[in-house]
Image (cartoon, rainbow, N blue to C red):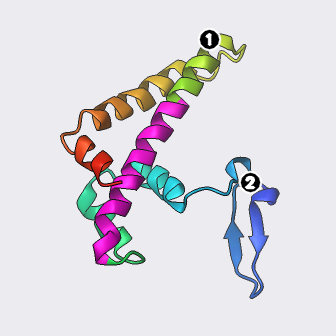
Amino acid sequence: PIASNIMLGPDGQVMLVDWDQAANADPCWDLGILLAEGVPFDRAARQILSEGVQAPEREAILARCRLYGIADDILWGLRGLLLSATTRRVDVEFFKYAQWRLLRARLALRDPRFEERLRSL
């Protein structure tokens, strides 16, 4: 972390923020990225969502989060490919990173639940 990513709340609570990707976007985008990175199984993701999402909405929210995770993998995979072709930095393995992100996206797109998730939006 760097100093610009740390804020103090009104009660003195430390908050971590990341201004590089700050946007007025769907909260499911950030949650989808987090779930894609750290919670690959839907059962565990449902447990996490149960903390703040009512049961009737949970499956639709999970589907939206998973689709955002796929979109983020494609986005960063393409960025990695672009950087691997254009950067002078040979110490960073942009191509390997791109391959990993695109592989994860491809696996998610081939998931038998993918069409069902699209239909639930």
Question: Which label number is shown at residue 13?
Answer: none
Q: Mark 1 points at which residue?
A: 85
Q: Are marks 1 and 2 in contact (CB under 8 Å)?
A: no
Left or right: where 42 falls relative to 17: left
**Quadrant in the picture for residue 64:** bottom left
Neighbourhood count class around disc 1 (C-alpha, 10 Å): few under 14, some 14–19, many 20 upward: few
> Disc 2 on helix, strand or loop?
helix
Foreground residue among 43 and 26? 26
The N terminus sits in image quarter: bottom right
User: In the current view of this chain or complex, which residue is farthest to the right?
Assistant: 4
CA distance separating discs 1 and 2: 27 Å
Residue 69 percent coordinates (x, y): 43, 45
Sequence order check, earlier mark of 1 and 2: 2
Left or right: where 111 falls relative to 104: left
Three-letter amino acid code of the residue under disc 2: Trp
Residue at 29% over, 74% down: 56
Residue 114 highlighted magenta (yes or no): no
- Bounds of the magenta segment: 55-76
Residue 71 highlighted magenta (yes or no): yes
Three-letter amino acid code of the residue under disc 1: Ala
Foreground residue among 71 and 107? 71
Residue 4 percent coordinates (x, y): 81, 58
Question: Which label number is shown at residue 19?
Answer: 2
Rendered position, 38 above or below 93: below
Residue 72 percent coordinates (x, y): 50, 40
Residue at 42% over, 77% down: 52
Neighbourhood count class around disc 2 (C-alpha, 10 Å): few under 14, some 14–19, many 20 upward: few
> Disc 1 on helix, strand or loop?
helix
The C terminus sits in image quarter: bottom left
Residue at 71% over, 75% down: 14
